[in-house]
Amino acid sequence: MKRSLDKPQLLLEHHLKALKLPVFLNEYPKVAAQCATDKADYAAFLLRLSEAELLERERKGTERRIKAAKFPTAKSLDDFDFLATPTVNKKQVLELARCEWIDQKENCILLGNPGTGKTHLAVALGMAACRRGYHVRFFTGAGLVNAMVEARNEKTLLRLQNKLAQAHLLILDELGYVPFSKTGAELVFEMISQRYECGSIIVTSNLPFEEWTSVFESERLTGALLDRLTHRVHILPIEGDSYRLTQSKARQKRTTKTKGGET
Ligand code: ADP
Ligand code: MG
């Protein structure tokens, strides 16, 4: 049933819209009724509404930041099985999820074989940062180079660089799968140099540091890049087999056992 609105109510709803307080607008009749039942005073009524408005604003902000980060998939630390990857220090990861290292403009490097959960952890830490109000941007190494080369051709490189500089955290996933072109290597080096002590980076790679020269081709450039990247860094070496492979082997074993049991 439609509520019949008298003039003060109409005005109130107009003002709440103009002030961009949608939760106040939608919830005030319900909260007013609750407050009347609870015999809560006017201050309590305002407090309840403003808390609900703030919560909704935070939720929407997180949603916007997660969308803008362009993560490939949603991953969380709750879904990460630390028992399956014992070399990952759970305490260290939970500490990183508190994001104090981002305030300190420090970096984080995840090193390990394919399938060991590097992307999962990088995305989960990125999403945790979004929830805490930080601006994050996710790229694969190759994706970043493509975006930068394209921007340079379209004469918008500076705009892209400025935009990336605004992110509190930049995630560079899969460094090492594809060697960079000379231009690509220089652009990535420039980006990492610009962020040095200005913003945080998470890098994931399947290659140990000694082999990074094969990605950037130049020994001099790789040395200078590692020097900046690892000055204040949290390194998470992940050892072990691919999680995917281990899971599918376990599944296969279960299926064979079940089939064996049936015959
Ligand atoms: P990498 O980036 O190291 O190649 P991924 O993070 O892509 O590995 O992991 C491969 C898949 O296995 C993903 O679906 C990921 O969610 C899952 N996975 C890896 N390690 C774990 C883990 N310890 N707990 C839960 N899922 C995991
Ligand atoms: Mg990966």
Image (cartoon, rainbow, N blue to C red):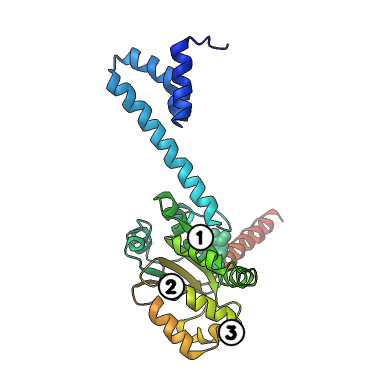
Mark toward the viewer: 2 or 3: 2
Q: In this view of the protein, can residue 194 be seen by the observer?
A: yes
Quarter for ligand 2?
bottom right
For marks 1 and 2 on the same chain, the one whose residue lies earlier in the sequence: 1
In terms of depth relative to the viewer, which is nearer, 15 or 137? 15
Residue at position x 44%, y 36% from top?
A: 56
Q: For mark 1, give the secondary structure.
A: strand
Distance (Cα) linking label 3 and label 1:
24 Å
Location of mark 3 (residue): 182
The quadrant of the rendering that contains the C terminus is bottom right
Residues tagged 2 and 3 counted as in contact (Cβ below 8 A): no
Is 260 on the left or on the right of 1, as rendered? right
Distance (Cα) linking label 1 and label 2:
16 Å
Amino acid under disc 2: Gln
Q: In the rendered image of this protein, does residue 153 appear above or below residue 93? A: below
Amino acid under disc 1: Arg
Residue at position x 53%, y 81% from top?
A: 186
Location of mark 1 (residue): 137
In terms of depth relative to the viewer, which is nearer, 133 or 11? 11
Q: To which quarter of the image does residue 48 belong?
A: top left
In terms of depth relative to the viewer, which is nearer, 29 or 243? 29
Location of mark 2 (residue): 194
Q: In the rendered image of this protein, does residue 19 appear above or below residue 161? A: above
Q: For mark 3, give the secondary structure.
A: helix
Q: In this view of the protein, can residue 210 be seen by the observer?
A: no
